[in-house]
Amino acid sequence: MDRPRLGARTLAIRVVLLAVTVGAIAAGAAAFDGAGACSSAIVGRGGGDAECFHLVRMLAERLGLFVAAATAVLTLTAIGLNRLVVAPDRPPPRPPGL
């Protein structure tokens, strides 16, 4: 059950795609959920003002960026820990000049 390790480029592409996908889903969900509050009866009788929608969009974008960055960091941490645990026993590399 030995699977070959992913190359650095393939790993980077997969982590970026995962982070962008999760960040976009989080931003979309936050924008959809927050936009409902702009047009609710709490704000007023109108359909909601442009400032409220702009604020919700801006905060949703920030949330999406934060979630994307956190996803990338946590994914790379899990991959690194997995490689440390699964790696075969090898002596540590010797520093040059010894």
Image: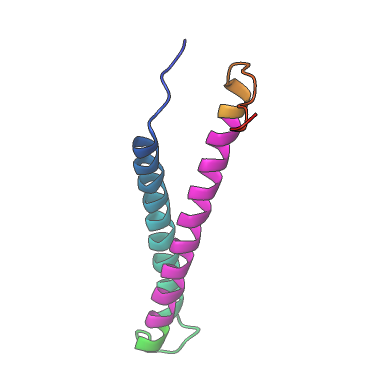
**In the image: residue 88, left or right of residue 23:** right
Q: Position of residue 24 (x, y in %)?
A: 37, 57
Viewer-proximal residue among 94 and 46: 94
In this rendering, position of residue 75 left or right of residue 23: right
Left or right side of 85 for 68: left
Residue at 63% x, 24% y: name it: 85
Prevailing SS of the magenta stretch: helix
Q: Position of residue 93 (x, y in %)?
A: 60, 27
Where 48 sits versus 92, above or below?
below
Q: Position of residue 60 (x, y in %)?
A: 44, 69
Segment colored magenta? 53-82
Depicted 92 relative to depicted 43: above or below: above
Question: Residue 57 in magenta?
Answer: yes
Q: Is residue 6 above or below residue 13?
A: above
Residue found at x 44% / y 57%: 26
Question: Is any atom of residue 49 visible in this view?
Answer: no
Q: Quadrant of the C terminus?
A: top right
The residue furthest front is 97
Colour setup of the view? rainbow
Q: Foreground: 80 or 63?
A: 80
Residue lying at the far top in this picture: please name it: 1
Q: Quadrant of residue 32?
A: bottom left
Residue 42 seen anywhere in this rendered image of the structure? yes
Q: Is residue 88 left or right of residue 26?
A: right
Viewer-proximal residue, 35 or 39?
35
Q: In front: 19, or 76?
A: 76
* Magenta highlight on residue 37: no
Q: Quadrant of residue 77?
A: top right
Above/below status of 45 relative to 16: below
